[in-house]
Image (cartoon, grey):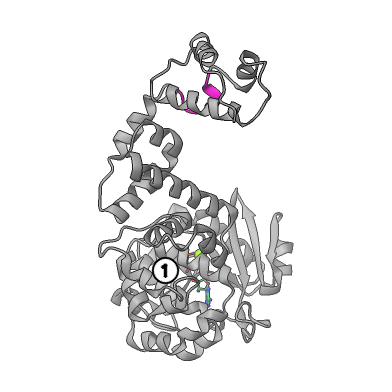
Amino acid sequence: LTKYFSNAIQVIDHIEKHGYEAYFVGGCVRDLLLERQQGDIDIATSATPQEIQNLFKKVIPVGIEHGTVIVRYQGESFEVTTFRMDGNYSDKRHPDDVQFIKNIEGDLARRDFTINALAMNKFGDIIDPFGGKEDLQKRQLRTVGNGRDRFLEDPLRIIRAIRFSSQLGFTIENNTKEAIIDCRSNIKDLAVERVTNEMGKFFSGTYLENGLYYLKACAIQNYLPVFRHHPELIELLPKQMEPIETFGEVITLFHLLNRDISIQTWAKAWKCSNHVKNQAEHLRNSIQYYEKHGADKWFVYKTKPMYFNMIARLISILFDRKLDENKLHQLYRELPIHSRSELKINGTDIVAVHAAFPKGAWIERLLQTLEKAVVEGELENDKTILREWVTCNPPEIN
Ligand code: ATP
Ligand code: MG
């Protein structure tokens, strides 16, 4: 077992020393066997949350009612969940009741896909009651148990199937695919936030093209926010698609593919955070400027380097044009200033020069003109020069 698991092994060891069982479960086992980059480490145990709280100094009770706590150990966090069986998901959000159980096999049975229903002990031995290893080899997604039952129990599993097809590049086994098609109308009852979270991972999947193939083959777009009123949108994506890293980029992309649907509409329907919405608006503004003026100095100044990569991706998808990111970075480095605060003149200075004029929106307009002239190299960023320019350009007030 890799160094990656070393602290987690000690956590499992500690739980076992007190007479309970504990295993690695879910995504971390799957990704280890796939030699894929590791996400979080989840641990399943026969100990109750209360018992876990007694065993470790630092335990955060994040989801006691579902049997989950976070154990902090040597600066790392591990999600530790008591073996459980799920009751009904009558609100399509959370299981109505969870029942703690005694053995790992029962816990694995509640999980969505065979490749996610693997457990591993601290020695690296795999527990695989549902043929998950074989499905990993076949590179296929198959539900644990009857697909229809499992998808009706929690329709989010449909979205998760599509998400994993995009992340792992796996096929969806035929019965599972048929069950997805039979049960897909239940997607609309899900809490949108859960769908958004999975679809963010879908769009950033390494095998997005494979994911899009299954999304379309199962017509899942017809049951997703916004897309369900505009199912043609998904067809507007080019055949060759790179992964899209952030959800802000995703909604910018679809907004620009049909500008009648505003970013506000997307953000609201998908219940995006303000952060995501602001990012989308920033990206949209940059692309709109680019369409008119190209990738000039003002463009890189306003866009900011952390967005170059996203902008390049969007421009490639939207206009089938390659932006040279290195050139953007170089252009940015050569700018005389990188933010307005570096400008050698400010609002107070401007007011002092034109003391006779009443304060108003003209101050901001002048500042913007100066900022742009300095960025574009038309004016030197020198206090005397800037002040002289302001003196010669009295505000236009109308
Ligand atoms: P990732 O690497 O993206 O986190 P993951 O497989 O760990 O992938 P999570 O959403 O973190 O996915 O879920 C952890 C585990 O919990 C899954 O591997 C699966 O066994 C189980 N699981 C999660 N969501 C569901 C669900 N809706 N129904 C059944 N089992 C689920
Ligand atoms: Mg996980």
Residue 341 within the segment the image draws in magenta: yes
Say what secondary structure mark 1 lies in. helix
62 left or right of 220 in image:
right
State how many labels appear: 1
- Residue at (35%, 33%) from the top-left corner? 329
235 left or right of 387 in image:
left
Q: Quadrant of residue 193?
A: bottom right
Residue 71 lies, with reference to residue 303, above or below; the image says: below
Residue 299 lies, with reference to residue 114, above or below; the image says: above
Looking at the rendered image, the quarter that the C terminus falls into is: top right
Ligand 1 within 8 angstroms of badge 1 C-beta: yes
Nearer to me, 313 or 375: 375
Q: Residue furthest top?
A: 384
Residue type indicated by callout 1: Arg
Q: Kindly identify which residue carries mark 1.
A: 30
Looking at the rendered image, the quarter that the N terminus falls into is: bottom left
Residue 111 within the segment the image draws in magenta: no
Q: Which residues are magenta?
A: 337-343
